[in-house]
Amino acid sequence: MNISMVMSLVMTAIGFIYTFSTFALPDARIGIPYEPKVFPGVLGICLIAMGFVLIIQEMSKLKKTQQTDAAKGKFKFDANSRNIAFTILNGLLYALLFNPLGYVFSTIVFLEIQLYIFRGLKPWKNSTIVAVVFAVVAYILFTSLGIYLPTSPFGFI
Amino acid sequence: MNSLELLMHGFTIAAQPMNIFWVTLGGVLGTVIGMLPGLGPATGVAVLLPLTFTMGPVAALVTMCGVYYGAMYGGSRSSILINTPGDGAAIAATYDGYPMTLKGKAAAALAISAIASFIGGTVSTVFIAFTAIPVSQFALKFGPAEYFLLYLFALSATASMSDGNVLKGFVSMVVGLMIATIGMDPQSGVVRFTFGLLELQGGVDFLIVIIAIFAFGEVLKSFKNIKDGKIKIQKKFGRIWVTKEEWRRCVWPIIRSTPLGFIIGVLPGAGGTIASLMSYNNEKSLSKHPEEFGKGAIEGVAAPEAANNAASVGALIPMLALGVPGSGTTAVMMGALMMLGLQPGPTLFQQQTDIVWGLIASMFIGNIILAIVNLPMAGLLVRVLSVPPKILYPIVLGLTFIGTYAISFSTSSFFLLLIFGVFGYFMTKAGFPTSPLVLAVIVGTSMEQSFRRAYKISNGDLEIFTRSTISKVLIVLVVGAILLPGFKYLYQQYKQKRKTV
């Protein structure tokens, strides 16, 4: 199954969940009771219909592709996908560390990991300099602009 | 006051030293972001948006405009020097810009790109100054039904003119409208699609969606382009200017491409990419030496550069005067306006004269500053291209997180950033255009409210949507936008048949 087919199925599934959730919405207490459901209802039905057409299109494409090149368009977990997966995990870790460690330290950790994902361990000194300089400069810049970022447990930054 | 007097008034605001400083800073930062492969004006504005959060409205908007134009200029630098366009609008600059670099004429290519961009941008700003008021006055005739249809037209045109499968464009649009319905319904107070999450009661902030799709998702997309080592790039140039002969060859292409780009920019869904490609093909067909195109013809750089800058200015008309963004970048710009508490649309020209005319005047100033920055400082700016992307992209990612935090001051928005960023990435990978989604998220709430207001006024009679002449014209345009890809397909089939016969 290629990525286009997977996304078509995902979109159709979103359409179903959204439409069912629309019908489950409570009625409005003011004005026309069903009013908050009309617009979402139309959207949900449209997405389901378009999703089905996309799935049919993809299936006919898949048939043709299988005849010519079965592997074409297939999702592969290559180095690029690995980098993306690690970036997402790194982002989740960043979200968890942001408040407890403060902006500067959590950003240093986030960038160190991100730079490690791309550059490996060898240029660690250079990566550390980049991470520290970015975190400190961004902290100073944003706080001076009036955007207050969380400080570390040490209090100073 | 007439347009000219208002424009002069705008100059007194835009020419204040701090505003000049902000437009210069925005221009330089935008140029740097625009030079990064895959990152265009929309990403530039999205990433740098947080810098403006604490500024006044005029300062914030002139900075954003600086970033917008800067990214347009920057996109063509990387096209000319390393054959890698910053975004779609800069693709046409690779056709002849890079061959010029290979021939040792990089300085002339950079110069004509900056000059054409300057002329295209400045002349279009004159157009916008004189057309925006009539357009906004006309828009005052619009009621909720007309507004609903106008939004529908803008979204349909964007979805219909997206690259690849048109149906995917419409799916993207509908998903964007669905995202806009999350949260408490402003009219009835009913909480919709929050799945019990308190954080979603206020809705999904469209700025987070913008940053996620245009910045985070674009960076994820660029991962596969990250190469080892440094890119070899020409950093030393002679005098960055053009000869008399080169100028003579470019004058008419620039003059022809500017109005063309402006008109295409005004149309929803079109924009810089189509404008630059159309003007390139136009000049190629008009040239006495079409065989030189693609091999380093200087007019092949001048025409698309003038057109795409003119289009970027033209695209601001529907956004400012009607409150309807026609492209991804103007959607981000509209997001910036709404973040400042301003509602783009016809009343903006009546109620916020200082801001609107200060912004328009700053476009003139911004174009002058960017031409100055991009001519003598080209050698310095292009050094950014030699910084390994493996360092630059993680930094851009860091900026997306700080930007998201600055919007909500809550780390729960990081999860939304990741969800929408990844969703946007997979959408692009599967061939779904993301611009219709972003546009729909921004205008979705207004679109639904317009629909419901019209529905209420007419006591549930849908005939209200066909009552006025404006509505009828808009319905024809919506149907036209939906059917356009079908007509295109039939025309291509007809052409192919004729060829074979």
Image: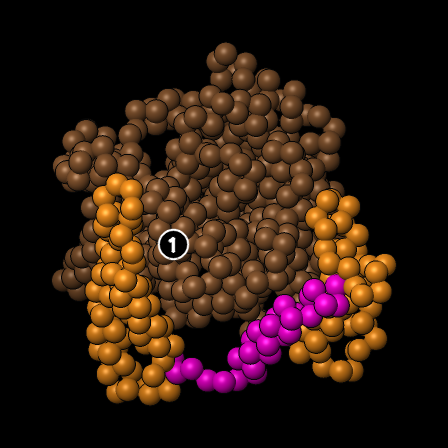
Chain colours: A orange, B brown
- Residue B410, position as x, y percentages in the image: 61, 58
Crowding around mark 1 (Cα neighbors within 10 Å: few <14, some 14 to 19, many 20+) is many
State the residue lying farthest toward the front: A29
The residue singled out by tag 1 in the image is B191
Q: Is mark 1 on a helix, strand or loop?
A: strand
Residue at image point 49% right, 59% down: B198
* Residue B75 position (above or below residue B197): above
The kind of residue tagged 1 is Val
Majority secondary structure in the magenta region? helix
- Residue B128, position as x, y percentages in the image: 47, 28
Residue A33 on the magenta span = no
Magenta stretch: give its range: A73-102
* Residue A137 position (above or below residue B313): below
- Residue B226, position as x, y percentages in the image: 61, 72
- Residue B469, position as x, y percentages in the image: 19, 29
* Residue B337 position (above or below residue B218): above
Residue A83 on the magenta span = yes
Residue at image point 37% right, 64% down: B432
Pinpoint the chain carrying mark 1: B
Residue at image point 65% right, 20% down: B12
The one nearer the camera, B476 or B117, is: B476
- Residue B479 lies left or right of residue B132; in this view the side is left
- Residue A113 lies left or right of residue B263; in this view the side is right
Q: Quadrant of the C terminus of chain B?
A: bottom left
Residue at image point 33% right, 86% down: A69
- Residue B482 lies left or right of residue B174; in this view the side is left
Question: Does any portion of residue B499 appear in the rendered image?
Answer: no
State the residue lying farthest toward the top: B1
The one nearer the camera, A58 or B75, is: A58
Question: Does any portion of residue B194 appear in the rendered image?
Answer: yes
